Image (tube, helix red, strand yellow):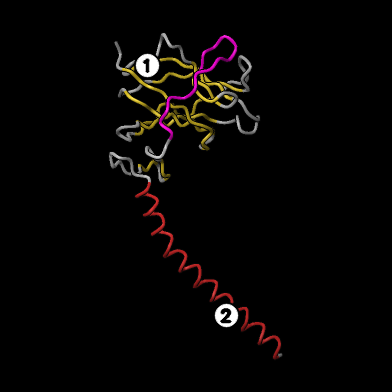
C-alpha cells in the first residue's frame, strides 16, 4: 500500500511539474512570436497579413519573378517539375484583363487530386485576392501529371505571389510581374 501511495504521489507531482513548465513555455512563446514579426517587417514597414485565420506574409518572401521554362511546346513560368503556369513573353500578365492560363502540376496522384485554389498577394500593398476558387483538376497533359485551365484577372500592376493550393494545402507558389494594360 505504501508503494502504491508513493507511486501515486510521484505521478501527481510529475504531472504538476509538467503543467507548470508548459505554462511557462506558453508565456515565453508570444514574446518570441513578437520578435519574429518585428524581424519580418520590410523596409516599408508592412505588417503580417492574415487571411482566413492563417498567417500569410507579403514580406519575407523571395520576391523574384519565377523561372521561365519550356514544357514541350508550352512556355511556362514557375518551378520546373513541380508547378507551372502558361506564359508567353509576347502576351504578359496585364491588369484588368481576364486572361486564360493553364496551370501544370507534377507530383504523385495523392497530392494532385482535389480542388485547386489560387490566393494572390501583391508585393507592395500586401493586398490579398482569391484569383481562382475550387477549380477541378483535369488529369495529365503535355507531360505534366495534372493540369487545370483557368482565367485570371489582376487589379493592380506590380509583383504578385500566386500561392497555389490543392485541397486547401499549399502546393507551391509562382511569382509574376503584372503590367498595366496597353
Q: Residues within 10 Å of mark 1 (few under 14, many from 20)?
A: few
Question: Does the residue at mark 2 contact the one at mark 1 (Cβ under 8 Å)?
Answer: no
Q: Quick check: 152 left or right of 136?
A: left
Query: Tag 2's secondary structure?
Result: helix
Q: Indicate the position of residue 34 as horizontal and vertical percent values.
A: 36, 54
Query: Tag 1's secondary structure?
Result: loop
Where, quadrant-wise, is the N terminus in this rendering?
Answer: bottom right
Q: Give the residue at mark 1.
A: 98
Residue at (41% x, 57% y) in the render: 32
Distance, label 2 to label 1, CA atoms, is 65 Å
Q: Indicate the position of residue 152 as horizontal and vertical percent values.
A: 40, 20
Magenta range is 62-76
Q: Nearer the viewer, residue 98 or 171?
A: 171
Q: Quick check: 4 left or right of 99?
A: right
Q: Is residue 115 magenta?
A: no
Q: Indicate the position of residue 6 as horizontal and vertical percent values.
A: 66, 86
Q: Which comes before the other along the chain, label 2 or label 1?
A: 2
Q: Give the residue at mark 2.
A: 13
Where, quadrant-wise, is the C terminus in this rendering?
Answer: top left
Amino acid at each position: 500500500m505504501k508503494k502504491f501511495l508513493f507511486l501515486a504521489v510521484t505521478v501527481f507531482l510529475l504531472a504538476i511539474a509538467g503543467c507548470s513548465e508548459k505554462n511557462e513555455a506558453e508565456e515565453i512563446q508570444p514574446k518570441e512570436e513578437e520578435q519574429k514579426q518585428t524581424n519580418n517587417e520590410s523596409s516599408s514597414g508592412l505588417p503580417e497579413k492574415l487571411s482566413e485565420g492563417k498567417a500569410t506574409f507579403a514580406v519575407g518572401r523571395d520576391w523574384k519573378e519565377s523561372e521561365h521554362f519550356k514544357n514541350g511546346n508550352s512556355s511556362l513560368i514557375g518551378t520546373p517539375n513541380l508547378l507551372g503556369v502558361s506564359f508567353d513573353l509576347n502576351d504578359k500578365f496585364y491588369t484588368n484583363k481576364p486572361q486564360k492560363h493553364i496551370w501544370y502540376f507534377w507530383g504523385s496522384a495523392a497530392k494532385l487530386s482535389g480542388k485547386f485554389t489560387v490566393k494572390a498577394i501583391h508585393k507592395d500593398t500586401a493586398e490579398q485576392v482569391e484569383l481562382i476558387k475550387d477549380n477541378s483538376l483535369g488529369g495529365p497533359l503535355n507531360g505534366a501529371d495534372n493540369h487545370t485551365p483557368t482565367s485570371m484577372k489582376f487589379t493592380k500592376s506590380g509583383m504578385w505571389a500566386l500561392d497555389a493550393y490543392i485541397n486547401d494545402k499549399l502546393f507551391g507558389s509562382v511569382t509574376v510581374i503584372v503590367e498595366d494594360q496597353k
